Image (spheres, rainbow, N blue to C red):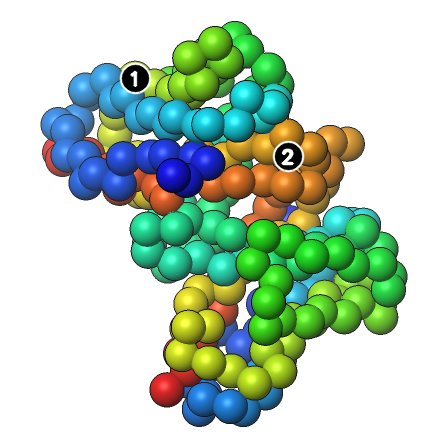
């Protein structure tokens, strides 16, 4: 069993839809949680970073961490075609031990 | 892009040959990382560096070595390339006070071992 599980999709939604992306994990010691966005043939770029449990909002993006369920989510409101990318969750117990999910490919259709 | 340059961007090499990938940063950050990305596995840490001549192993370090003789350059070497090392390699730097939790990535090097 992988430490971090992420549904690879693909996920296709119409423009304006609310998108929900999720990851589960097995290591209860993880305390740093990140979401990255990766466009095709580009490097990942950091979208959201949260420490421990709770919610964090940044514009159209909301990250949620539920440590009791070992489950993290990223919500995208009013999705746009420019949001079409692969979304990677990442988490770590210590600062230099980041573990990534395999990524979910999202397509937002105009 | 936090001033990260990877070279080469693409490389095809033969099994058994040595290969060196270079990561160059312009902003003097202390922490640098090498990852590989493969379908179904996401990104996996190979090695990282926390200063000149200071390096440590990551999750998938077998078959790889690294060197950092200057703050701005972090080299990844495949001593004898194998087909299983065909992958996309990303360099990253950490800019936050919580190292590796605010990482910025380079554009990647696509390596094919034939």
- B112 lies above or below A21: below
- A102 lies above or below A71: below
Camera-nearest label, 1 or 2: 2
Q: Is residue A104 left or right of residue B43?
A: left
Q: Nearer the viewer, residue B2 or A9?
A: A9
Secondary structure at numbered mark 2: loop
Q: Is residue B70 left or right of residue A76?
A: right
Name the residue carrying label 2: B101
Residue displayed at 37% across by 27% down:
A23
Residue displayed at 36% across by 34% down:
A5
Mark 1 is surrounded, within 10 Å at the Cα level, by few (under 14), some (14 to 19) or many (20 or more) other residues, namely: some
Disc 1 to disc 2, C-alpha distance: 24 Å
Q: Nearer the viewer, residue B109 or B36?
A: B36
Secondary structure at numbered mark 1: loop
Mark 2 is surrounded, within 10 Å at the Cα level, by few (under 14), some (14 to 19) or many (20 or more) other residues, namely: many
Q: Which mark is residue B6?
A: none
Name the residue carrying label 1: A77
**Disc 1 sits on a residue from what chain?**
A
For the residues bearing labels 1 and 2, Cβ distance under 8 angstroms: no
The quadrant of the picture occupied by the C terminus of chain B is bottom left
Within the image, what quadrant is residue A32 found in?
top right
Residue displayed at 59% across by 15% down:
A52
**Disc 2 sits on a residue from what chain?**
B
Q: Position of residue A69 (x, y in %)?
A: 42, 12
Instruction: Evaluate whether residue A83 shows in this view.
Output: yes
Q: Position of residue A43 (x, y in %)?
A: 47, 53
Q: Is residue A73 left or right of residue A97?
A: left
Q: Position of residue B13 (x, y in %)?
A: 45, 88
Q: Is residue A107 left or right of residue A28?
A: left
């Amino acid at each position: 069993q992988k430490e971090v599980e992420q549904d690879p999709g693909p996920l296709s939604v119409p423009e304006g839809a609310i998108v929900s992306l999720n990851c589960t994990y097995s290591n209860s010691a993880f305390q740093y949680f990140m979401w990255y966005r990766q466009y095709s043939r580009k490097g990942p770029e950091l979208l959201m970073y949260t420490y421990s449990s709770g919610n964090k909002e940044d514009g159209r993006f909301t990250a949620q961490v539920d440590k009791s369920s070992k489950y993290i989510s990223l919500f995208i409101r009013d999705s746009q075609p420019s949001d079409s990318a692969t979304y990677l969750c990442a988490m770590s117990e210590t600062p230099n031990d980041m573990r990534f999910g395999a990524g979910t490919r999202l397509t937002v259709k105009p | 892009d936090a001033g990260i340059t990877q070279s080469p961007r693409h490389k095809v090499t033969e099994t058994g040959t040595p290969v060196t990938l270079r990561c160059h940063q312009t902003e003097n950050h202390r922490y640098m990382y090498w990852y590989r990305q493969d379908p179904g596995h996401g990104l996996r840490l190979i090695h990282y560096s926390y200063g000149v001549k200071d390096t440590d192993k990551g999750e998938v370090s077998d078959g790889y070595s690294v060197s950092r003789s200057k703050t701005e350059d972090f080299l990844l070497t495949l001593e004898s390339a194998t087909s299983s090392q065909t992958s996309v390699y990303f360099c990253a730097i950490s800019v936050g006070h919580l190292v590796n939790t605010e990482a910025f990535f380079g554009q990647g090097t696509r390596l094919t071992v034939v």
